[in-house]
Amino acid sequence: MIRVIGLMSGTSLDGVDAAAIETDGVAVGAAGPVTTIPFPPGLRARARAILDRAGSLAADDPDLLAVERELTQLHVAAVRALDWPAELIGFHGQTILHRPDVHRSWQIGDAGLLAAETGVPVVHDFRSADLAAGGEGAPLVPVFHQALARGLEQPLAVLNIGGVANVSLIGASGELLACDVGPGNALLDDWAMRHTGLPCDRDGAMARAGRVDERVLERLMDDPFFDRPAPKSLDRLSFHRAMDLLAGLSPVDGAATLAAFTVRAVAGLRLPFRPCRWLVCGGGRHNPVLMDGLRDALGAVVEPVEAVGWQGDALEAQCFGFLAARTVRGLPLSFPGTTGVGRPVSGGRLEWRGLPAAAMQGVERLRRR
Ligand SMILES: Nc1ncnc2c1ncn2[C@@H]1O[C@H](COP(=O)(O)OP(=O)(O)OP(=O)(O)O)[C@@H](O)[C@H]1O
Ligand SMILES: CC(=O)N[C@H]1[C@@H]2OC[C@@H](O2)[C@@H](O)[C@@H]1O[C@H](C)C(=O)O
């Protein structure tokens, strides 16, 4: 095993998560420290503006390059804050565009700068190889969920409720199926920001005070994404136009309806087998309206991943540490059942230009395995 730091800044644009783990890309060893460096409000707004116009942005757009540099420095700060002797870094970057229909997924972040500033080799660009091979480019986390779930009773579902929600289904005979599910917290966050100026509906307070508008909910669910078979993936802005359907609802009823939308998208999944339990990670597990709604709608055991000793806020960051180790070993990151790619494919690129040979010792050890 080697010591890897994983870095993830998700679609919620709330901060950079950093997590240390020991792994060889197959087994998951001891977890090290974790931290989150919140986006300064100015950066969050500028990153959001970039995301909103990513479809028409040139790669050398000055605003884009400035945001990319600032974001990378935030990742450097996150690595330094862990104060942990990493031998490898897995750097997801910030997704600003995800268009699998045109084989494109764009993560910004300067891996060369991160490697130079930290003195540690960096794996980045995790999604391109899958997209080039015909996959959705997401989700990539299922193989990590499966590695973590070794020894737990299966079949099992691991549901991530981040900005976007995604699920991994781990079968009792080693099957691994996955897809993006629906809106997660992103729409709720936008609604809360619009009506309260706060970044989220903390603890579901608004949603709990409101009533679900069934008519609007039905129209929200009337999106072709839900009829598509898995594997499939989403962009943060995928359901953005759906927000128009909420015009006329009070702030609390809108929040209740959006929370119900997230739940209904999960409950509407057509699953090939019934999981014995649902383990939930991502920020949405802190929202009791979502968790209670899932329990009611699924009629199943729904628990935060802490129930089995996992760290729900660090899981995606740990995942990109794990995937970085797989990249070094040339092991697959994605599979036909997870991204729809035709065959298992590896991915990620290693950046270590300018680093001394000694910095590559951990990577070389892993390669020899
Ligand atoms: N106490 C809470 N009450 C309600 N919502 C919460 C709470 N804590 C976190 N959240 C929600 O979780 C979100 C952050 O989740 P998370 O960090 O998993 O997202 P992400 O990693 O950016 O997303 P993704 O997995 O899509 O990349 C916040 O934007 C907020 O909506
Ligand atoms: C393109 C992109 O960044 N997608 C994210 C996003 O956030 C959740 C969901 O949408 C998932 O598809 C993915 O992240 C996780 C880590 C994944 O690839 O598994």
Image (cartoon, rainbow, N blue to C red):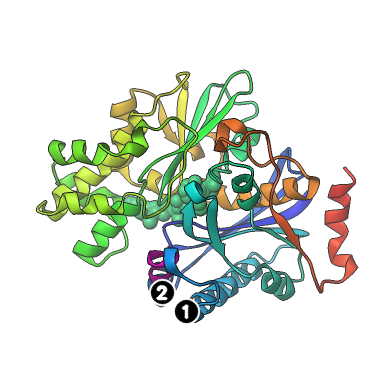
Q: Residue furthest front?
A: 102
Q: Position of residue 45 (x, y in %)?
A: 37, 72
Q: Residue under label 1, please give it.
A: 63
Mark 1 surroundings: few (<14), some (14-19) or many (≥20) residues within 10 A: some
Question: Which sits in the foreground, 361 or 305?
Answer: 361
The image quadrant of residue 123 is bottom right
Look at mark 2 in the image and give the residue it sits on.
46
Question: Quick check: is the Cβ at mark 2 less than 8 Å away from ligand 1?
Answer: no
| Amino acid type of the residue that numbered disc 1 sits on in the rendered structure | Asp
Check whether the beta carbons of the residues at disc 2 and disc 1 lie within 8 A of each other: yes
Choose between 213 and 296: the one closer to the eye. 213
Q: Position of residue 235 (x, y in %)?
A: 42, 51
| Amino acid at pointer 2 | Arg
* Image quarter of residue 222: top left
Chain-order first, disc 2 or disc 1:
2
Which residue corresponds to the image point at 72% horizontal and 57% vertical from the top-left?
349
Q: Residue at x 85, y 61 (%)?
A: 360
Q: Provide the residue span drawn in magenta.
A: 48-54
Position in image of residue 310 (x %, y %): 56, 41
Cβ at disc 1 under 8 Å from ligand 2? no
Callout in the foreground (2, 1): 1
Q: Which mark is residue 42?
A: none
Q: Is residue 53 magenta?
A: yes
Name the magenta segment's main secondary structure: helix
Pick whichever, 58 or 273, lies toward us.
58
Using the image, determine if residue 163 lies above or below residue 280. Answer: below
Q: Is residue 294 visible?
A: yes
Q: How far separated are the C-alphas under marks 2 and 1?
A: 8 Å
